[in-house]
Amino acid sequence: MSASGEAAGAAAGYAPHPYIGGRSAALRALAAWRMRWPGAPRVVALTGSPGSGRSRVVAGFLMLCDPAYRKQLPVDDLDPATVPPDLPAPVVPDVRGLTSAQVLWLLADHLELAAGRATDVFAELGAREEPLAIVVPDVDRAGPVRAAGEPARLVREVLAPLAATPTVHLLADVPRELAAELAGALPSGQVQVIDLDAPEWADPEGLVLHAETALAPEAGAPDLPYTTDPAARRKLAEALARRAGGSRLTVQLAVQSLFAHSEGFDPEDEAQLPATVGDVLDLHARRLGADPRTLRQMLAPLAFAEGDGLPVELWRPLADAAAGRDMGRVLADGILLAAPFVEPVEAPVDEDEEASGPEAPAEPAEPAVRTLVRLTHPALAAEIRSGLPDPRDTQTKIAMALLEAVPQQDWSRADRYVRDHLAGHTLDAGLLPQLLVDPGLFTYADPITLRTAIEAVPLDQLGAPARTYLRTAPLLTRSGAPADMRAALLETAFVEDDLQPYAEALHGLGLDLPWRTLWSLPLAGVASVAAGSLPAAEEADPAAPGAGRRPVVALVVPAGTPGSRAVPVADRPESEASADQEPSPAQPSTTALLFQDLLRPGYVEADPAQVLRPSDEERAAAPYGLSRGSDYLRVWDRASGDVVTALVSDSPFRDAELTPEGVLVVATERGVTARQILAPAPAPAPATATAEAPEVAAPTVPAQATAPAGTTSADAAAHGRPHGPEGDHS
């Protein structure tokens, strides 16, 4: 399996792979891996320099592995050693733009694993009786934030454990430094590294064929002397391949540059042929009579772009910022200059973007399509960034221009790209901690992208609001909640962390939050909660609602809790939610009670004998009811049976009660919170209404997030994992 096999294959009369046009040595090794040939490694790491064509090799190999696709290929004309057996297609997760946790749960969902934690996924795979083939292309494109280092995280947290699982046969397309790390974690003989730049895997003739095919009129080349004449075409292809030093990307960009503007090109002059990707940029600019620096300034915003690309309307302001001058005329006149290096992407505008903001229509229109622009290859972007005098300074200017593009700092009106990706730009510029003080950004930014960026910052560099967001982020990513529910979950978190100004700011965003958090106690060990009332103080306004009584909540706490009083178990207030928590004979005959004002922070000195629980009539007349699941609470309208809101928690629920005043008191393992329900009050239920929860539909918020594209299995909740696309990435 070496490069010498290329000539042997050609001599035997085998046709080249129609998509790859060579790389027979690598294809033979991959075919041996797929058929589990004796002596073949269980794990293969395919690598090479950026632009070496490793993604193309994997794509061409997968064509042969897919039973349906291979029927379209001339399999009988190919070298039999390069054709894998006719087996079921391997599992191929699309990792582009995904976090390592998303990739793991994408695999788990596709394979229908009943796993609740990441370790369970690998354990279930290890318990399989049949080997499982997994192919992971484009590891270098993993992650929603370029500067967050997600490819390395994917290798360490997902690919390395997969590679260590004996039943898994893994093929991964990884950058060179990560290929060495992956191989170093496995015993000798179990892994093979195929470096497409190494002499034993290089394919010089295949690169010539690649260039020759790209220059052919059948491939769309214009009619030129060196494209229509086979001998001249072959000669130019050989020169291009020789100069490019094995880089498929350099050859491809050189051909695209030539087709965009062929005037002034002399195929006999090898000085006009590029040796690197950077040479392609500079030679193209000079051939069009432009300064190479101008071309790089034009493309700089695209080189720093995050996600799928930059909205075309943002290209001009970001180019102005990066260049420090007006680039309007340059961009208007530079379409031909930039054409070989840029590609448009049509991206759907999702309903969340169409309907964002307090002034959004009640029923959003059909999703529209917007145009994004991006560079044709990540290696081209890396070349442009590295060629700048000060890449961080350029990124800083781009980030500041994006921040200025937020209308009146109203994040509900900001472009979706700005909302979701400003954090990635500021992370790369070293400015992210300064940005993480805006509750509006926390609410409207995509939580997976923002969380990924924040997690890349050392914890000691984050301020208190950012730390609150970080601990709340698993709820936001797991539930797939829309903006108003994200704001509500964050509002409670800010109150819990004693950051009330940030909680109040969330109420000023113009969103209809389902509740207002009245208070929070960081009190561990609360066993149950029970609402009631005490006689009010003499100075209370007798005309006020509920005059004569003071709403309180009794908390059953561990004995010895400061401020609590020990009382016999039989004397403690009972709650409906904790009625099944009867003391066992082994439990002590006393417990501790702590009284808290229901409507505001503050402990209350009270005699348990004076506490009155709501009557059955008061409960039945209350506008809301409460139902509880294992990891959620639902508040429903007693009159209609509709769900008013739902609550999930990152800490297990211990108890909960909804008072007739519409205050939801919840005890978790972390503490106790009280939330005033803010939904429009429904008509009071008739006195004869039952206090039991009606049959209600599943709440629309927070619903389980849709799995990433490419998932073919059921919702994660069906497997008992309420993790959404982020899995247990908590």
Image: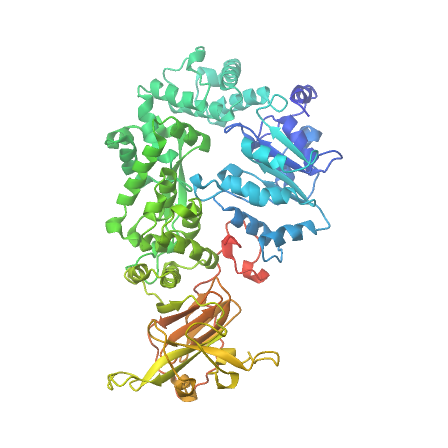
User: Viewed as shown, does residue 683 lie left or right of 231?
Assistant: left
Check the picture and name the quadrant holding the N terminus: top right
- Residue 420 appearing in the image: yes
In the rendered view, how is the structure colored?
A: rainbow
Above or below, 162 against 295 in this view is below
Q: Which quarter of the figure has residue 610?
A: bottom left
Above or below, 589 against 557 in this view is below
Position of residue 518 measured from the top left corner of the image (x, y, whole percent): 34, 70
Q: Residue 574 or 302: which is nearer the viewer?
A: 574
Name of the residue lying farthest toward the top:
268
Position of residue 221 measured from the top left corner of the image (x, y, whole percent): 45, 24
- Residue 715 appearing in the image: no
Position of residue 277 measured from the top left corner of the image (x, y, whole percent): 44, 24
Residue drawn at point x = 51 percent, y = 37 percent: 140
Q: Residue 277 or 262: which is nearer the viewer?
A: 277
Q: How many marks?
A: 0
Q: Residue 231 or 699: which is nearer the viewer?
A: 699
User: Viewed as shown, does residue 5 lie left or right of 588?
Assistant: right
Residue drawn at point x = 39 percent, y = 23 percent: 281
Above or below, 470 against 43 in this view is below
Position of residue 482 measured from the top left corner of the image (x, y, whole percent): 40, 59
Residue drawn at point x = 40 percent, y = 53 percent: 467
